[in-house]
Image: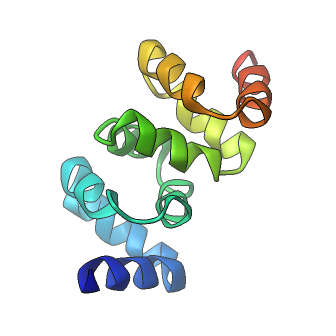
Amino acid sequence: MITTDLCSEFISRHPNSAIQILEHFGTADAAHILTGLPPATRATAIEPMHPNFAASVIGKFSESETAETVAVMGPQSAAALLRKVPSERRKQVLEQLPVDTRKPLELLLRY
């Protein structure tokens, strides 16, 4: 609990430093650190990451964690990230999103 709170607080207050640290750890460790954090905190860390690295990180999340994270991201950031995700996984994640979140993403993903 303390570790989770510390990670959330650090990411919220120092997102750029947190991203550098997470990218240094690699995708598996970054995903492990982010798993269990609130979706908004995960999104704060994921959105500014290099898209390929971010896609690899969320590839380690469960589908529900990925959907929760994508749901709180800005639509253009979410679409850019989902473009890097394999199509089958992308489809599964999109299916878990509320319609009002999914539809705009589906439109953006067509471009």
Chosen colour scheme: rainbow
Foreground of the two, 40 or 50: 40
Q: How far across and down, in percent of the image, does residue 48 sit?
A: 55, 58
The quadrant of the picture occupied by the N terminus is bottom left
Q: How far across and down, in percent of the image, does residue 44 sit?
A: 55, 64
Q: How far across and down, in percent of the image, does residue 47 sit?
A: 56, 54
Foreground of the two, 1 or 70: 1
Q: Residue at x 51, y 58 (%)?
A: 39
Q: Quadrant of residue 10?
A: bottom left
The quadrant of the picture occupied by the C terminus is top right
Rendered position, 90 above or below 53: above
Q: Quadrant of residue 4?
A: bottom left
Foreground of the two, 99 or 29: 99
Residue 78 lies left or right of residue 50; in this view the side is right
Q: Residue at x 34, y 38 (%)?
A: 62
Residue 57 lies left or right of residue 9; in this view the side is left
Rendered position, 77 above or below 104: below
Q: How far across and down, in percent of the image, does residue 91 sit?
A: 53, 17
Query: How many labels were placed on the picture?
Result: 0
Q: Residue at x 58, y 26 (%)?
A: 94
